[in-house]
Structure formats: C-alpha cells, structure tokens
Amino acid sequence: SLMGDINNYVSEFIARNLPEDTNIDPKTLTIFINTYVYSLTLEVFNGRDIQFNEKIDGMINNIALCF
C-alpha cells in the first residue's frame, strides 16, 4: 500500500505541474518513473555496476518522447 500512496502523491504533484495542453496521464508517467527507479534499485541491490548518469539520461530521453 505504500507504493500506491507514493504513486498517488507523486502523480498529484506531476498533475499540478504539467502544462494544461499536454495529453500525458500523470498516473501513467508516475508509474513509469517509479518502475524505472525500482529497476535501478534492483540492479544496485544485486551488485551490478551501473552508470547512473547514463541511466538517468536514458529515462529523461524516454520521458521527453512522451511530450
């Protein structure tokens, strides 16, 4: 239930800060961001050496495609 609460809070924040003329669903965007962060966390937890800057740039580039 904690992840659901976090998704709700973050999606409300995103909804308040997105331009009104966008067709992006804040809840979908929030789930995408949380899933991406969760996958990075799992990689680190499992001892994989990841390049955070590259991963974050990849996430930003993927989000930019939504706009």
Image (cartoon, rainbow, N blue to C red):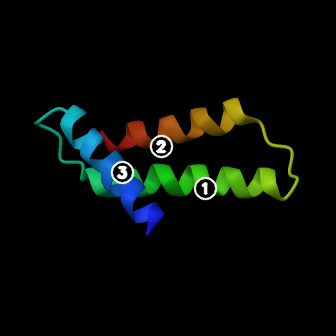
Q: Which mark is residue 57?
A: none
Q: Residue visible at 71% across and 35% down?
A: 52
Residue identified by numbered label 2: 62
Q: According to the image, label 3 marks what residue?
A: 29
Residue sitting at 72 percent across and 58 percent down?
Answer: 42
Question: Callout 2: few (<14), some (14-19), or many (20+) C-alpha neighbours within 10 Å?
Answer: few
Name the residue tied to disc 1: 38
Tell me if 9 is positioned left or right of 36 in this view.
left
Who is closer to the viewer here, 59 or 65? Answer: 59
Check the image and report above or below for 43 versus 14.
below
Q: Position of residue 9 (x, y in %)?
A: 32, 49
Of the residues shown, which amino acid type is indicated by label 2?
Asn
Q: Which is more N-terminal, label 2 or label 1?
A: 1
Q: Viewer-nearest of labels 3 and 2?
A: 3
Image location of residue 31, percent across then percent down: 42, 58
50 lies left or right of 6: right
How many marks overall?
A: 3
Tell me residue 47's x, y (percent). 88, 53
Front position among marks 1 and 2: 1
Residue drawn at (61%, 56%), measured in percent from left and top? 38
Give the structural element (helix, strand or loop) at label 3. helix
**Element type at marker 2?**
helix
Graded by Cα atoms within 10 Å as few (under 14), some (14 to 19) or many (20 or more), the crowding at tag 3 reads some
Front-most of residues 43 and 4: 4
